Image (cartoon, coloured by chain):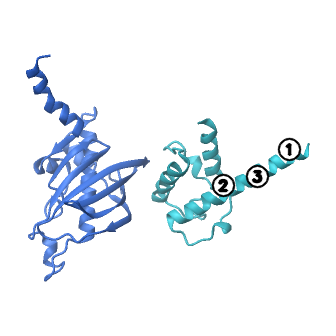
Chain colours: A blue, B cyan
Amino acid sequence: MSSATALADAPAAARARKGLSYSSDDIKQMLPHRWPMLMIDRAYDVVPGVSGRGIKSVSVNEPFFAGHYPDHSIMPGVMIVESMAQLVAVVYVAEILEGATGATEDDASRSVGYLGSISQMKFSRLVVPGDQLTLEARLGQRLGGLRQVKVRASVGSELAAAGTLVVTTGRKG
Amino acid sequence: MSTATFEDIRTQAEARLGKNMKVKSMIINRLGLDVEPAVVSDNQPLFGRGLEMDSLDTLEIVVMVNNEFDVLISDDDFEAFGSINALVDFIEDRETAA
């Protein structure tokens, strides 16, 4: 192998090691969510079906700031959880798209399930306009259509929230 | 039957009762149930009229058993959720096989 080939292969090797990345436009193909409930701007380091990281940039234009609160803008904790859950959905849908099932993005976005439980969630820091949430998700054990996920969100080096979710895989009922 | 064998059996039985009580306490703590471990019988159903667990609780127990006993319960192992005895039988069976 020439040194030029080795250099050309280096980014591919780095991508494989770091996982997949998805832009905002990619994510819109993967999730059924739309404004004002699309709560993740980018995903990266995604290992399909296993783990991933994501970004949610928090703008003062978020509709929930109109009421939470009019004179004191704080991102509601449940919206942080929603951002985490949407990252989980990206990791899950990535597994379907990268699998050998031949599923289209349309099929995959319809397979996004629901939140089953939120447990041991701690909120450690206020999240305000201008903050950029770094989201992390690691999928754990599954049983039937349920999957446990460890999630966390941070702003810079400060932890904002961390806990455990259970999500359903697929829609029922 | 020798005294030693009787003692062995009694030790085993006590160990098993202790393990059942440990599993009961773990389930009650993990699921935040408002019940004393001592009033949960070993053969009481975990679902329905028993401890009234649901499928989300079942996944909690799967995670708990894996963390505590390093035993994996899969989709095909639903017999493990019949009762406390069934769950401990399953755990001991897998521990012996390992």
Q: Is tag 2's residue or tag 1's residue first in the polypeptide sequence?
A: 1
What numbered label is drawn on residue B19? Answer: 2
**Quarter of the image that includes the C terminus of chain B:** top right
Residue A103 visible in rendering:
no
Q: Quadrant of residue A151?
A: bottom left
- Helix or strand or loop: what does disc 2 sit on? helix
What numbered label is drawn on residue B13? Answer: 3
Rounded to the nearest whole Å, what is the CA distance between mark 2 and mark 1?
21 Å
* Number of residues whose C-alpha sits closer than 10 Å to that of mark 2, classed few (under 14), some (14–19) or many (20 or more): some
Q: Is tag 3's residue or tag 2's residue first in the polypeptide sequence?
A: 3
- Helix or strand or loop: what does disc 3 sit on? helix
Task: Identify residue type, mark 2.
Answer: Lys
Q: Is residue A145 left or right of residue A88?
A: right
* Number of residues whose C-alpha sits closer than 10 Å to that of mark 1, classed few (under 14), some (14–19) or many (20 or more): few
* Chain containing the residue with disc 2: B
Where is residue A79 drawn, in percent x and y? 23, 66
Q: Is residue A136 left or right of residue B32?
A: left
Question: Tags 2 and 1 in contact by the CB under 8 Å rule?
Answer: no
- Helix or strand or loop: what does disc 1 sit on? helix
Question: Tags 3 and 1 in contact by the CB under 8 Å rule?
Answer: no
